[in-house]
Amino acid sequence: MISEVAFAELYRTHYSRVLGLCRHLLGSRAAAEDAAQEAFFRAHRTLASYDAGQPFQAWIMSIATHHCIDIVRRRSKERAIFGTETTERVEAEADTTDVLGELLAAERARDLKAAVAALPDKYRLPLLLAYYGGSSYDEIATTLGLTKTHVGALICRGKQALRKALTSLEEKRA
Amino acid sequence: MTHPSQLACSMYADRALAPAQAAELERHLASCAACRARVAALEAETGALRAALLQEDAELVAAPPWRRGLRLLDVLGLGAAAALIAWTSSVFWGALAAVVPSGLRWLSPLDPRSLWNYGIDIVVFIANEGSFMLNSISSFATVAAFAAVLGGAAMALRKQAGAAVLLSVLLMVLALPSTGHAFELRRSKGITTVPAGETVDDTLIALGDTVSIEGDVHGDLLAFGRRVTVRGNVMGDVVSGAETVEISGTVGGNVIAGGSQVSLLQARVAGNVYSGGRGVRLDDGTEITGNAVTAANDVDVAAHIGIDLRSYGRDVNFSGNVTRNVGAYGETITLVAPARIGGDLTAYVSADEKLQIANGATIGGKVTREVSQNRALSRRGFDARIFEPRPNRYATAGFYFGQMVRLAAAFATGLLLLAAFPPLRLPPLRSGIDLLRAGGIGLATAVVAPVAALIACITVILAPIGIIGFVLGAIALYLAKIPVAQLVGLLLFKSTPHYAASLLAGLAVVIVAVNLPFVGWLFGPVITCVGLGMLVMHGLDAVGRGHLVR
């Protein structure tokens, strides 16, 4: 069982990462602050169920993820926000944009973040969970209630969309 | 040779492919340079993607101070602490009071009776403000609907005569009083009346300068005006507010009446009587089966009361007949013949000699005298405030003081509300359209909810729910200005301030706006509607149904 003092310490340590995830997932600073607070509130309420052998970061990130996904689902007008697996797979194969590879240098981080923020929910959420939240495809599949291949297709599509966005930005600048 | 799919490569680069498929793909890579290059590029790309995303924004790092939410244990703890503080201070005040002249005893802030009074005052204040808002909303809605209809009619007339005729017919149909409703509304500038011999089958709401009920009302009667007279029979309750209320008929339920002068003359009331005003008179021909509660400057009770009587007044004059106990609070209390009390008399007076019991009066139980300086009608301003013609309000210092008190009260309430429900700190609006939506939802709520509560009240079984609904509704109407103030406050600041700051700034703007001469009356209902709508949206968000209204 974690003491109040220890929890406050964990809060200080992990807050910025949780806030970052919420901000990426929700797209707004204000909503992210609320969501991060809420995630810690929930964690604090359910401390009893926390297995101290597990890393705290994974636990709090999964609470925050669930909360943010609930918010996104609530916001969305569509019932199935992640589309169907078949459609996404077919579309993923149809796309032939070149992989950016090393072109995606660190100095383009700002453009990249903006492009990620502009992605539709269905691509942004799994992509962020994988590359920012550090979740495995299996974990993402469980969280979102999708199959692993569906998650794979969404991430693949997300990356393709990013490539297009960055390439067209490049062309505009040139 | 078939190359692996884009999906397979992407998942392989992320180490997410099942072992069997991964092995198969690796076999292909061994013999295909193009795919090897592709996978390598994918790996480099995700590496860069991770790195870019993880690059911390400098502004994101600082964590606000940790505040955990209130839990039941905290609430209990706080309650216990408050009780302990109250108890120790009352002991302290008790000890202090022993050395202080008794005349100053009312100064104690923890005198249980004055605490009780404060509580009542707060509820009355909130309900008053709420119902005032409701009144202004309903007239605002009527005006708005009327204006919309007129506008529509004008448009139709310009275009097509046929449409105009249709519209007029529709309007006439709508304007006809529909008999199927569970209540009837009668309203006029002059005299609103139910003449002798006429019977109203439902609950009647009567508004007018003079309201005169000579006939029968089978439901409840709600009558408001300058002068309300009830000589007929009302099967349900009578709720009335007027400068003078005079009831001399038969009432099957309770009487709740407030006004400068409330008189029950030769009346028969099957339930209880609650009355307040400058003067309350229950004459000797009046019979009340239940209890009577009267609060007024001058209380004159000569009636026959079936259970208990409780009177608050400056001068309480009693010559009636009460089957059980009498509790009287007054500066002077006089019992004159043929007063008769079956049970006990408890009199709270300002001095021993101010309770006078004449020879002809009989009291079955014991007489208790409580001498208190405190209570000599603390709510004396009650009637004067409402009914005396007022001078230009902007010219009085009291007006500004009153507004400051209002601001302080609203600020305190708002702080509590925002502290208890953090989501309220941010408006539930995602666009300008949402503001209009909030207004619409609020107007609909303000119109539909009271009607629903009224209907609930009429069906006897749901009556408690209806009454609770009314009280909650009145409180919600009072609270409605808080989310609006918060919104206005947030708009005033460039960066997001502490919610207390935005609330205070917003409330100040709101209170100034509703008090503006000539246009202020317009702001009140708009603010209330929008705020009510925002509260409803917050509520829906809280239960995950926010998308229903967006």
Image (cartoon, rainbow, N blue to C red):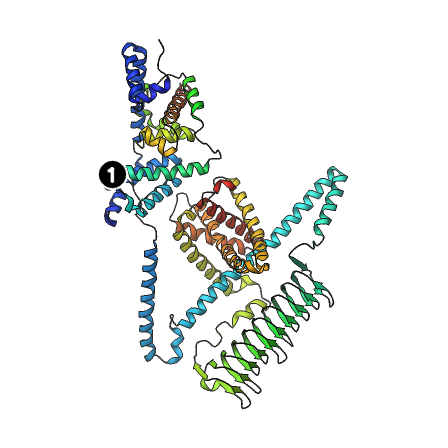
Where residue A136 appears, x then y in whole percent? Answer: 31, 29
Neighbours of disc 1 within 10 Å: few (<14), some (14-19), many (20+) = few
User: Against A109, is B244 above or below?
Assistant: below
Farthest residue, direction top: B1
Where residue B379 appears, x then y in whole percent? Answer: 50, 71
Q: Residue at x 37, y 49 (%)?
A: B498
User: Against B69, is B366 above or below?
Assistant: below
- How many labels, in total? 1
User: Against B14, is B149 above or below?
Assistant: below
The quadrant of the rendering that contains the N terminus of chain B is top left
The residue carrying mark 1 is A54
Asked whether, in this view, residue A174 is left or right of residue B395, the answer is left
Residue at disc 1, secondary structure:
loop
**Residue B61 lies in what quarter of the image?**
top left
Work out whether residue B190 can be spotted: no
Q: Residue at x 44, y 26 (%)?
A: A84
User: Against B413, is A147 above or below?
Assistant: above
Where residue B431 appears, x then y in whole percent? Answer: 49, 39
Three-letter amino acid code at the position of disc 1: Gln
Asked whether, in this view, residue B31 is left or right of residue B340, the answer is left
Where residue B134 appears, x then y in whole percent? Answer: 56, 56
